[in-house]
Amino acid sequence: MKKKVLVLTGGGDCPGLNAVIRAIVKRASQESDWEVWGSLEAYNGILKDPMELVKLDFERVAGIHAKGGTIIGTTNKGGPFAWGVQNPDGSFRTEDRSNELLKRLKDNGFEAVISIGGDGSQKISKSLFEKGCPVVGVPKTIDNDLSETDFTFGFQTAVQIASDAVDRLTTTAYSHHRVMILEVMGRSAGWIALHTAIAGGAEVCLIPEIAYNVKKVAERINKRFKNGRGFVIVVIAEGAKSDVGEVFGKKSTEYGYENMRLGGVAFQLSEELKQAGCEADIRETVLGHIQRGGTPTAFDRVLATQFGVKAFEMVLQGDFGKMVAYKNNDIIAVSLNDAVKNYNYVSQKSYLVQTARGVGISFGD
Ligand code: F6P
């Protein structure tokens, strides 16, 4: 009987997930006594009746490194510790099914789990490890908000897409003498916005870590116009807020979806700017899920492939309770405990913020 490793992808999809899956399968195929299985939609596959598990072999992973999304599906709702159950009256409650999950893993001969996911998924990995589950984490998120890795795959792809969007918006900006506001994702971290603003040559970059003053932003914009002519690109992170405002979001009505739904702060900023005396015409673009879709950049494919190979090698070594990470141009293992301890905010003192200020980008502070 072969040894089995269960692979799953959790949280929002992200370019590079398939490249990780493929790398795990390819590396595992070099060990004659191992086989790789996937659980569909994170832990749902193994917790459902009947279970939804797929054997991941060469044929299934052929050519998928260049495809966005995940061939084994994902979910950012629920999980083994908060499994959604519908009551007879239609309402929902959650149940802790973590013990059952451990039993199912054992009963089905799984010797290890590789969980590919962001902050929320790795918190689940940590709790499962503490209950005795042999788990290895692989970090993924376009937001780049995990603290123990310099980069996550998917981030660079998102920045590339957002920078392309700035290039396109710039043509309308200069032709019409407009202010073009581009809103990008990132939750509470400004990484995507900051990289995009620098790569795209924006004049203003508004991020969650630096509260902006709308008057200062308006003044900065007005300076760029002479006799009504000029143009400005503003990149704003979805989680940015003014020095007197709140994060622009709403609670989701989807059952089991715990995060606040962000999106739309660009429109709020537009109104604020008009009230603060911004004279130019303003247009808003919310990039949304476009920055999470499609083919990963070469960098993200390479990073994802390294993560996949390393994760399987950690399984071989029995190096559990850890997460693969990219640090100082090396692929290492960090404890899940450390991995989920701190959120990776943009530091105001970072070289990147200094660089942005150095080329005259305003943070509105
Ligand atoms: O965490 C990745 C991310 O794309 C965030 O940048 C964004 O706020 C969120 O997920 C959107 O989530 P959903 O796809 O559930 O709407």
Image (spheres, rainbow, N blue to C red):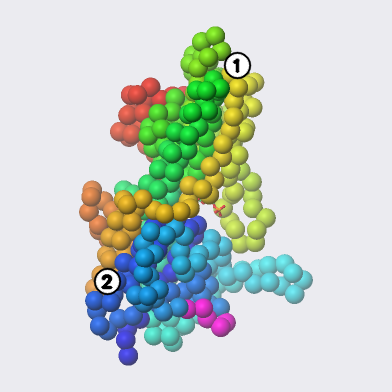
Assess whether residue 150 is covered by the magenta stretch: no
Residue at x-position 52% and y-position 23%: 175
Q: Quadrant of the N terminus?
A: bottom left
Residue at x-position 27% and y-position 84%: 33
Residue 164 sits in quarter? top left
Residue 29 sits in quarter? bottom left
Q: Residue at label 2?
A: 27
Q: Is residue 267 above or below residue 293?
A: above
Observer able to see residue 194: no
**Label 2 Cα crowd, 10 Å radius (few <14 / some 14-19 / many 20+):** some
Q: Residue at label 1?
A: 279
Looking at the rendered structure, the secondary structure element under dot 1 is loop
Assess whether residue 52 is covered by the magenta stretch: yes
Q: Is residue 180 above or below residue 311?
A: above
The segment highlighted magenta reads 49-53
Q: CA distance from mark 1 to mark 2?
A: 59 Å
Q: Is residue 38 above or below residue 250?
A: below
Observer able to see residue 104: yes
Q: How far across and how far down the image is residue 126, in percent? A: 40, 65
**Label 1 Cα crowd, 10 Å radius (few <14 / some 14-19 / many 20+):** some
Secondary structure mostly seen in magenta is loop
